[in-house]
Amino acid sequence: MEAPSSAQADRAWSELLAAIGRMPLPGGSFRHIDPKHPDALRIAPGAPPESRELLSLYLPLCRGGASGAEWLVGHLGQSLNGCIATHAGESCFVTGPENIAHLHRMRALCDAVLVGAGTVQKDDPRLTTRLVPGPNPLRVVLDSRRRLGTDYRVFRDGAAPTLLCTVQGPYDRHGQAEVMGVPPQTANLSQMDLGGLLALLRRRGLRRLFIEGGGVAVSRFLAAGLLTRLQVTIAPVIIGEGTPGLRLPRLDRLEAAVRPPARQFRMGADVLFDLDLAGVHATTGQPAS
Ligand SMILES: NC(=O)c1ccc[n+]([C@@H]2O[C@H](COP(=O)([O-])OP(=O)(O)OC[C@H]3O[C@@H](n4cnc5c(N)ncnc54)[C@H](OP(=O)(O)O)[C@@H]3O)[C@@H](O)[C@H]2O)c1
């Protein structure tokens, strides 16, 4: 698959990577980002619409430059009936090429991309930035019970380092991947404690985290009130009964549902909803503690 591109948006993307110290700027000076505001990162007054759209999506994650705020963003690409894959687990591709390019950009902006064991098992993803300029992040696989074998690409292709997180020893290497033991939840010893996981990742200098699926992984972080933003891309496709995206506790009353501040971005035929969860606990509608 090739990423759809426009010269203006490609240039804006390169400037953004340069502004946050992830890549050198190829030739010339900033034209799409206002150099008068290097910390606040603003769109230059004369920037064309394609680059404005791209920058307005990513700038909130990049403010503060290389030492900017920590974030934990989850993404799911789903059908109109809320499925991220067929019942057999086929998900390549629910959303279109513009959204896939977006996932590669998110990988380039984060320190680590996280996926659940189910995603590795069904998709055997590479989790690299091969469709866009930008560095590969650390690949983190969440496999509490250490059920995955070593034959998946993330454990053997060497394209980027991989960290397997588990509560189940032994903690020796897993193919080419490093294995990190995570403390279990006190209420469920076979599940990892997500706060403990994040503390361990932070200790390794990993501060900007992107959870790329699947539904279980994103839902657990959302239910724990740990996501800074949730991105859900909706494709105009109807899948029969399939793999659900978000799985959350039931609510009886609609007034208890949370409607976080949301922005929308067109991605080809799809629409991405970018929800700002800072300050709100999405499963309860209560302010985050
Ligand atoms: N459309 C999309 O955006 C998208 C993205 C990714 C994947 N997919 C599709 O979604 C399907 C996989 O999704 P899924 O929801 O079934 O599985 P998943 O979230 O990828 O993985 C679920 C498993 O991973 C482990 N895990 C996940 N999060 C964890 C956490 N926070 N802490 C500890 N362990 C965690 C658990 O393993 P244990 O039960 O062993 O503890 C859990 O059962 C595949 O069909 C894939 O193709 C779609």
Image: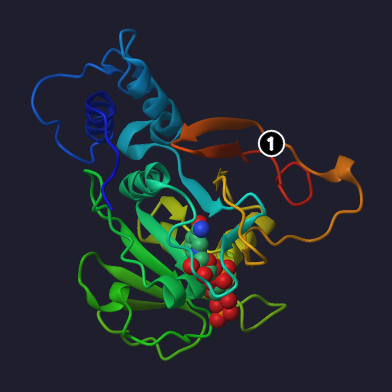
Q: Is residue 257 left or right of residue 235?
A: right
Residue with the mark numbered 1: 260
Q: Quadrant of residue 174?
A: bottom left
Q: Is residue 156 left or right of residue 103?
A: left
x, y (%) of residue 103? 39, 49
Q: How many marks?
A: 1
Q: Quadrant of residue 251?
A: bottom right
Residue 59 vertical placement versus 159 (above, below): above
x, y (%) of residue 45? 34, 8
Residue 43 vertical placement versus 84 (above, below): above
Hey, which residue is sitting farthest top in the picture? 45
The CB of the residue at mark 1 lies under 8 Å from ligand 1:
no
Residue 68 vertical placement versus 111 (above, below): above
Indicate the amino acid at tag 1: Pro
Q: Is residue 236 left or right of residue 123?
A: right
Q: Element under label 1? A: loop
* Residue at x 30%, y 77% (from the top left corner): 155
Q: Quadrant of ligand 1?
A: bottom right
Q: How is the image coloured?
A: rainbow
Hey, which residue is sitting farthest right in the picture? 253
* Residue at x 39%, y 36% (from the top left corner): 68
* Residue at x 38%, y 31% (from the top left corner): 64
x, y (%) of residue 111? 34, 52
